[in-house]
Image: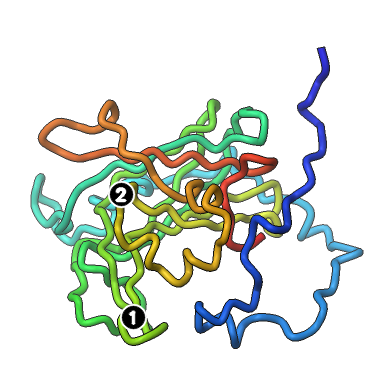
Amino acid sequence: MQDNSKRFVERDRNWHPPAYAPGYKTSVARSPRQALVSMQHATASELTGPAFRGLRMGPHDNDLLLNFRQGQGQGQDLPQGERIIMFGRVVDQFGKPVPHTLVEMWQANAGGRYRHRNDNYLAPLDPNFGGVGRCLTDEAGWYRFRTIKPGPYPWPNDPNSWRPSHIHVSVMGPSISTRLITQMYFEGDPLIPLCPIVNTIKDPDAVETMVGRLDMARSRPMDCLAYRFDLVVRGELQTYFENQ
């Protein structure tokens, strides 16, 4: 039987949008004007670590309902919005789990506003919601967050552009230089096909890798819905990562 565990799968360069995409206005200023320079001699810090197996997490690092709340009373001072569970597996191109890797996420609150000094959207901040979380995958590659479904928000790409509800997700590779970042959109959101950022991705299959799927089996009755979002870090079935 052939062992494919180390088979090299060349990246499809057409999978990603061009750096210069005028429909996505900020790409005009950010896209390179000269040929990229390859790193021929990476430093040790770029090729090694950190290792996360021994990283100590806080009790609520992956629970955004609790990790920023202001009050201490049970059931009090919880964030506003639709409660959800976001979960999935981090696997390689052959379905092999990636254990003990750091998964981080950040998002807007239920009104569509980030807790960031540069976010001036008129939606109010939620005093009990920070919008960031982290966790380590287990031996089988599973991760899990409890959070609030983020709201859509306007942005100045054109007179009436709106970002679909989404959660930013980062997964750390074997070194700092192999960190990968993507976004999870929500199944059925009508804003997805209208988003100028999404529309820079011409392959519909690539867009589908960024859509979290409703999972009623993992939802909690009278509490929260669950969305599954698997992260495939290499190969033909890889998740679309915006920084590759």
> Disc 1 or 2, which lies upstream in sequence?
1
Q: What separation in Å lies between label 1 and label 2 (alpha carbons)?
A: 26 Å
Q: Residue at x 69, y 58 (%)?
A: 14
Q: Position of residue 139 (x, y in %)?
A: 55, 27
Instruction: Decide: is 221 above or below 182.
Output: above
Looking at the image, residue 167 sits to the left or right of residue 7; the answer is left
> In the rendered image, which quarter is residue 203 located in?
bottom right
Horizontal side of 189 relative to 79 (left or right) equals right
Q: Amino acid at mark 2?
A: Gly
Element at label 1: loop
User: Badge 2: few (under 14), some or many (20 or more) residues near its Cα, within 10 Å?
Assistant: few
Task: Tell me if 128 is positioned left or right of 163 in this view.
Answer: left
Q: Nearer the viewer, mark 1 or mark 2?
A: 2
Q: Position of residue 161 (x, y in %)?
A: 34, 77
The correct choice, above or below, for 197 with respect to 183 in the image is: below
Q: Is residue 113 above or below residue 72?
A: below
Q: Quadrant where the N terminus lies? A: top right
Determine the residue positioned at 47% across, 54% down: 169
Percent across and percent down for residue 16 are 64, 60
Residue marked by disc 1: 119
| Residue that label 2 marks | 188
Which quadrant, please, contains the C terminus? bottom right
- The colour scheme used here is rainbow
